[in-house]
């Protein structure tokens, strides 16, 4: 058994342990709650990386005035601008790609969880539903790709098709909100292009969510919801908070009696001459 297979086995074992514990307490939907519990454990383990990501985003925002100065200084010379920008990041101890670290770390977990869920589904352990979801192994346990949904009418029937669409839709919506709450400065050309690419990520995840077991989609939705709560307590609403209008800006107090200027000796001499 190689390392990858062992990693998949660890995840499958963790899910099975959680499900048995929850089932032993007499709680229904044991496998669905086991996936949610597993998600929370992963989010807690990766919390230091998430905090690093948020700090990096704040540091990038703080550097925007300096980046604007570099733009004015170097103009259209992109090479010098890029070198000066990297030196600025180095001096400030900021990694412009630091925001991608939590996602990169979770990629192996996603793939391993995908394989583990398929293995558990083949053993018939994920046939139970979860609230409105008919089966945590479905619909791809019986249909390849999007054949369960397209062409219409859905092969699984309209009622099951609607039930299977809820979690993918929640995946897209929750991930869009997470991205909106995350501070992402756009003055940096590299960061701006990365932010534009990230705008497509929720819809890509939504498309993938239609072709993987519902158990994995439940993991994504739970992870996004936990990220929303986490970011709310750390950074607040972030960019979702409306910017103050000019009417809300504090007025600068103006003194009714401006201070008199000091008279110089030259002013006194000029007055005497007159």
Image: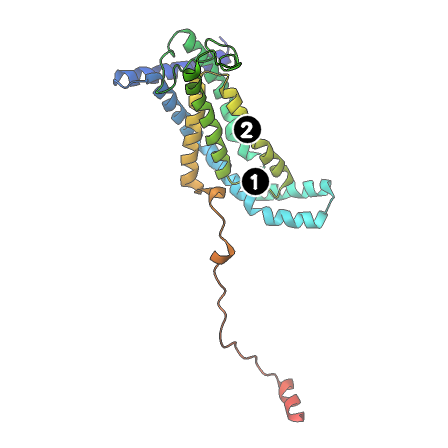
218 sits to left or right of 4: left
Residue 94's mark?
1
Q: Indicate the quadrant containing the C terminus: top left, top right, bottom left or bottom right.
A: bottom right
- Mark identifier at residue 201: 2
Task: Give the percent coordinates (x, y) of residue 20.
Answer: 31, 15
Q: CA distance from mark 2 to mark 1?
A: 24 Å
Would you say 191 lies left or right of 31 here? right
Residue at 64% in and 93% down: 272
Mark toward the start of the polypeptide (2 vs 1): 1
> Which residue lies at the image location 62% right of the left edge and 88% below the top edge?
268
Camera-side residue of 263 and 221: 221
Residue at (62%, 49%) from the top-left corner?
Answer: 66
Q: Note whether 247 is above or below 4 in the view shown.
A: below
| Residue 141 placement (x, y as % from top left) | 45, 10
| Place of residue 222 in the rendered image (x, y in percent of width and height, measured from the top left) | 41, 27
Circles 2 and 1 in contact, beta carbons < 8 Å: no
Label 1 element class:
loop
């Amino acid at each position: 058994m190689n390392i990858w297979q062992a990693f998949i086995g660890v995840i499958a074992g963790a899910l099975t342990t959680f499900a048995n514990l929850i089932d032993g307490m007499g709680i229904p939907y044991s496998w669905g709650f086991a996936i949610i519990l597993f998600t929370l454990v992963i989010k807690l383990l990766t919390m230091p990386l998430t905090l690093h990501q948020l700090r990096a985003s704040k540091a990038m925002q703080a550097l925007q005035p300096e980046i604007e100065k570099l733009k004015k200084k170097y103009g259209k010379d992109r090479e010098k601008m890029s070198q000066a920008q990297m030196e600025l990041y180095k001096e400030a101890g900021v990694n412009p790609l630091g925001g991608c670290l939590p996602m990169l770390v979770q990629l192996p977990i996603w793939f391993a969880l995908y394989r583990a869920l398929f293995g558990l589904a083949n053993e018939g352990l994920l046939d139970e539903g979860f609230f409105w979801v008919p089966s945590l192994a479905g619909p791809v346990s019986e249909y390849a790709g999007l054949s369960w949904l397209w062409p219409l009418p859905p092969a699984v029937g309209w009622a099951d098709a609607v039930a299977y669409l809820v979690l993918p839709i929640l995946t897209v919506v929750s991930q869009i909100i997470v991205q909106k709450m995350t501070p992402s400065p756009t003055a940096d050309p590299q960061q701006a292009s990365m932010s534009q690419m990230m705008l497509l990520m929720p819809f890509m995840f939504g498309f993938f969510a239609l072709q993987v077991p519902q158990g994995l989609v439940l993991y994504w939705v739970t992870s996004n919801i936990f990220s929303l709560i986490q970011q709310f307590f750390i950074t607040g609403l972030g960019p979702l908070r409306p910017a103050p209008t000019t009417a809300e800006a504090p007025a600068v107090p103006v003194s009714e009696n401006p201070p008199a200027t000091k008279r110089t000796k030259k002013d006194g001499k000029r007055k005497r001459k007159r």
